[in-house]
Amino acid sequence: MNPAHIVTVRDFSPVTLGAIAAHLEVSTDFEHMVYREAELDAIWSITAFALAQKPDDAVARLHETAHRAHDLVGEGRPRDAAALLRKVTPAI
């Protein structure tokens, strides 16, 4: 796992969320944190679009989780962000 690799976010599938979580778990440098925040921003945006089309409790939870995980990354807590993301992933 290379934390300098940027995860391509096209959806909020378990595969995409798992890749982001895996990268969060190994991220240590400032540059890595910027990448992880951008990935979480993409998840937040995509879930907002999905919710605008059709309300869904699981997607709403992921939307909020992406926001909280983003904040944790900003606080220098990427592993906590990964754990939070992994908790919600099976619900999607």
Image (cartoon, rainbow, N blue to C red):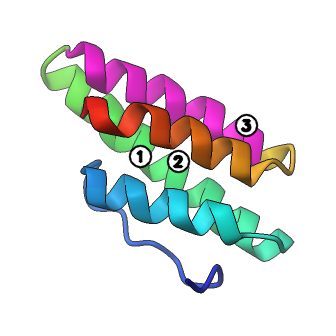
Q: Is residue 40 left or right of residue 70?
A: left
Q: Residues within 10 Å of mark 1 (few under 14, many from 20)?
A: many
Q: Quadrant of residue 54?
A: top left
Q: Residue at x 49, y 60 (%)?
A: 20
Q: Which residue is mark 2?
A: 41
- Helix, strand or loop for disc 3: helix
The span from disc 2 to disc 3 (Cα, nearest Å) is 10 Å
Residue 82 pos. (x, y %): 60, 48
Q: Is residue 88 left or right of residue 55?
A: right
Q: Quadrant of residue 30?
A: bottom right
Q: Which residue is mark 1?
A: 43
Q: How many marks?
A: 3
* First-in-chain label (1 vs 3): 1
Label 2 or label 3, whichever lies nearer to me, is 3
Tell me the magenta residue range. Answer: 56-73
Do the residues under discs 1 and 2 have CB atoms within 8 angstroms? yes
Residue type at mark 3: give it: Asp
Is 59 covered by the magenta stretch? yes
Q: Which residue is mark 3?
A: 71
Q: Is residue 19 left or right of residue 84?
A: left
The span from disc 1 to disc 2 (Cα, nearest Å) is 5 Å
Residue type at mark 2: give it: Asp
Do the residues under discs 1 and 3 have CB atoms within 8 angstroms? no
Residue type at mark 1: give it: Ile
